[in-house]
Structures are given as structure tokens and as C-alpha cells.
Amino acid sequence: MSLVLNLGEGINSSRFGTRWCAEGALIVGAQTRGDTQMLLGESLLFGITFKPGGFSFFHRYDPMERMADDVQPFDRSQFPNPDLILRHPAAYVDRFYLERLKPPRFSLVEVVASVEQHKGRVRMDELMHWHCTTARQLERQFKQQLGITPKEFIDLTRFNHAFGVVQREAGSRSLMEIAWDCGYYDHAHLANAFRKHMGLPPSAFVLSDSSKIAVA
């Protein structure tokens, strides 16, 4: 989940259409598919990306499920003051959110950490056992706080890890080897995940300009 404040001109998006980010504040839901964006003219953007499950510690925005793969206008009054952002970005935003901090009754932080620690190679029954909860509770809280199901989050986490490995190592390792190391059954399973989330197979991605973007 992200908040974006645009103080300049718009952005072209291959998925959301022309000028999806005109001047103003926007909320960006959990994105399960890739997108290509082009800045138009003089753009001045300030964004806050929350860790999975972190948005609900500071904002109440229900239901989050409707925000998946979407971008919508956001109430500017709930966004930090743009003038103070430009003058003292880190200090002001930290203070703004510390004053809004109010943890939800059921926090997903530890559940999310378990999924990320295992790089998405985890089953629902394991999460339920580790965190003493039920499938129904996880399903409800993930939809409410992240906008996607726990299985979708597990799938995305595994794919994001594989995505980074392909970017870094596709030239020195086979895609089959990468697929096995990242928890996919075979090369075809990895290719299907790339098509689902990026719109193209890993072999085509490696040759595209997007693959040149550095991965931390």
C-alpha cells in the first residue's frame, strides 16, 4: 500500500491509462501485476510505501480489498502537509505518522515477517500453526489490511524473490535452476508466474529494458 502526492504534472501508465496521476494525493493498493509508467513534463512526486500490513497502523480505509490493483484519489487532509514535506521531508513525515500510530487489534506484522523470511516458500497450515490462528481469520485480516488474500501474498512474495534472482543471475544460471531454488516446480511454473505478474515470460523479461533496473 502506498500514498503518492503529485505536485507537478501527470504520469502515463500502461495499465491505468493516460495521466492517472494528475496533481493531488492518491492511494495505490496492492499491485499484483507489473506496470510501466512515464513521467510527463516537470513532475514532483513524494511517496510513502508502507510495509505489508503497516498501512492499518496509521490509516483506516475499509475495505482494502477494493484497492487491489487499483489507484484512487486520497483525502488530502490525511496526507502530510506538502510544504513541510519539501522543507523537512524525513523529520516531518516521521513526526506526522508517530502522532497517528494506532495498531490494529489483529496485527499481521509477524505473519508477514514469517512469509518474507521464508521468501514465500510457506504453506497456509504452517502460518496457522506458527501464529495460533485460523484460515478464516487470516483470510479476513489479509483482505482487510492488505487487500489481497494470504495465498496471494505468499505467491507474490515468492515471485518477488524469483524476480530479483532472475534480474541478477539469469546470465549465469539456467532458469530451471532458478525456478527450483525459488520454490517453483519447474521452468514452466516460473514462466507462468512471470506471465501472470509481468505479462511476459522470464526469457523475454531478461531481454527487456525493465530487467536493467537494479534490484536491492
Image (tube, rainbow, N blue to C red):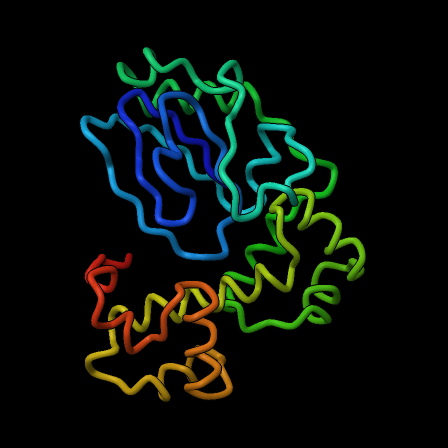
**Residue at 65% from the left image edge and 72% from the top image edge:** 123
Across and down, in percent, residue 211 comes to 24, 64
- In the displayed structure, does residue 14 sit left or right of residue 158? left
Q: Residue furthest front?
A: 18
Across and down, in percent, residue 18 comes to 35, 37
**Which of 203 and 215 lies nearest the eye of the viewer?**
203
Number of numbered labels in the structure image:
0
- In the displayed structure, does residue 12 sit left or right of residue 126? left
Residue 91 sits in quarter:
top left
**Which of 17 and 201 lies nearest the eye of the viewer?**
17
**Residue at 60% from the left image edge and 28% from the top image edge:** 59
- In the displayed structure, does residue 181 sit left or right of residue 135? left
Quadrant of the rendering where the C terminus is positioned: bottom left
> Can you say whether 33 is above or below 143 in the image?
below
**Which of 38 and 47 lies nearest the eye of the viewer?**
38
Residue 42 sits in quarter:
top left
Across and down, in percent, residue 73 comes to 50, 27
- In the displayed structure, does residue 60 sit left or right of residue 214? right
Across and down, in percent, residue 122 comes to 60, 71
**Residue at 45% from the left image edge and 85% from the top image edge:** 188
